[in-house]
Amino acid sequence: MATATQAIAIDENISQFVAKPRPMLINGKWVSAASGKTFPTYNPATGEVLAQVAEGDKEDIDRAVAAARAAFDKGPWRDMTPSQRGRLMWKLADLLEKHAEKFAQLESLDQGKPITLARIADIPTSIDQLRYYAGWATKVEGNTIPISAHGGKFLAYTLREPVGVVGQIIPWNFPMIMATLKLGPALATGCTVVLKPAEQTPLTALMLGELIQEVGFPDGVVNIVPGYGETAGAALAAHPKVDKIAFTGSTEVGKLIVRAATGNLKKVSLELGGKSPNIVLQDAEIDSAIPGAANAIFFNQGQVCCAGSRLYIQDKEFDKVVDGVSQLASKIRIGPGLEPTSQMGPLVSEEQLQRVCGYLESGYSEGAKATVGGSREGDKGYFVKPTVLVNTNEKMKVVREEIFGPVVTAMPFKDLDELIAKANDTEYGLAAAVWTRDIKKAHRIAGELRAGTVWINCYGVLDSAMPFGGYKQSGWGREMGHEMLNLYTEVKSVCTPIS
Ligand code: NAI
Ligand code: MG
């Protein structure tokens, strides 16, 4: 680990926030779990308990769903104009901006990520998402439909109505971004929400709940119930009074959500895992492709659903790109999130540390070699060195499965047809990238890759206005952009004779 530097001074409000057990938000009130139980959340840089949090379970989910149901079925949320809803959301964004530093610190403490990253990426992105979706509140439109049936003298139009009570289950890699990405479209379309943050990182969502209260959303519109997946999450997914579940997390749990949803056939949208190919052709601008490939996998400790975890490099440039990425990896400063010089923090949990180290062992046992990194860093906290694996092929577990850590597998290829077959040889289809100066090849490859997002000569560019989601087992539906309407609204056709 780089020599320890001074950690930033923690905001006094945060010290107070983590000092007492954090309650959950149900029907506009901060309450304890019905069972009275709490669970710990840890500081991943030290492995020490950071705070205790109310442990939601089935009974709490029942209370929260009842509150969300009442807020959806009766006023005052229902009676608000789209403009009033949009204004509340915009105010929430402004308030979050005012408290941005506090949120960045808490995110870094609970999740582990470098404070610099939380400051320039996570919190500004959350603010931008809230503003983007605030704008949508007044733009949810239907169509007028030309009718030919029965002689055609009809007026027909469609309405887009909120889908209803939405259960939102989110992961720990970008806790605030996930929360605002889920809350934004639900509130813009007039839905009400029960949000279950990940058990590893519940704190910033709870602090956001305080701002939601301060802004003055009506009671029950946003309920936040922290708890474990197998209990609180499962109860929400199965709940008969929930109209839709929006889930981001593992493909394994995505399948459980789908099964749990069959009881009342609630709508389901899923944003799941990935094993995204990042492709460097020999005619690429190699000096951009190298840092691009490093950033594609090492950003956020590699805990990114669309991370560029399979690096395909055309023969001629293989050694140069692998050396370049390895050199950049060797220079990354690893350290606790709250030290401003840290460029890479710890993984989120002991469980993820074990998982990622397990993948490294599996890679070595199948013949893979690390050109850089290759193991845990230190023995305190959950740090893993940024790692490039070579001697890998499509049969290996490290190439087939999502590692979700700072580990990239680099593989050479000769011709484009061989490459496309390999790139698509995965059960996932979340994202992909290609680096080349040849625009014909770039767009041909973009067309042939089975992935929800394809980047050309860049990686990881995401925007509230650009749809995001997966082919194959990477998910169902597209979040962000206009596409969110398909996830959060029901379409109603209204038809009447006019002669
Ligand atoms: P997970 O899928 O178990 O957790 C995500 C969310 O689902 C959490 O809020 C959790 O409490 C909830 N959950 C868990 N079991 C549930 C159930 N039976 N019913 C309802 N909700 C449930 O992911 P986990 O175990 O934290 O990480 C395992 C792997 O999943 C990672 O190594 C990574 O490969 C993948 N992952 C993918 C993410 C993505 O952004 N697509 C995010 C987090 C993890
Ligand atoms: Mg899990």
Image (tube, rainbow, N blue to C red):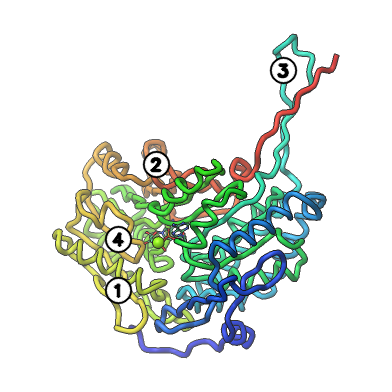
> Mark 4 and mark 3: span between their CA atoms?
55 Å
Which residue occupies 27% across, 39% down? Answer: 421
Q: Position of residue 282 (x, y in %)?
A: 28, 48
> Mark 3 and mark 2: span between their CA atoms?
36 Å
Task: Tell me, yes or no, whether the two marked residues, 1 and 2, touch with CB atoms within 8 Å.
Answer: no
Q: Type of residue at label 4? A: Val
Q: Nearer the viewer, mark 4 or mark 1?
A: 4
Which residue occupies 71% across, 55% down? Answer: 134
Q: Nearer the viewer, residue 279 or 135?
A: 135
Task: Tell me, yes or no, whether the two marked residues, 3 and 2, touch with CB atoms within 8 Å.
Answer: no
Tell me, for residue 330, which label it has, or none.
1
Q: Nearer the viewer, residue 54 or 315?
A: 54
Quarter of the image for the C terminus: give it: top right
Task: Tell me, yes or no, whether the two marked residues, 4 and 1, touch with CB atoms within 8 Å.
Answer: no
| Location of residue 474 with respect to 218 vertically, above or below | above
Q: Residue furthest top?
A: 151
What residue would you read off at disc 2? Answer: 472
Q: Position of residue 138 (x, y in %)?
A: 76, 47
Mark 1 or 3 closer to N-term?
3
Query: On the image, which quarter does residue 323 sit in?
Result: bottom left
| Location of residue 168 with respect to 445 vertically, above or below | below
Mark 4 or 2 closer to N-term?
4
What residue would you read off at disc 3? Answer: 147
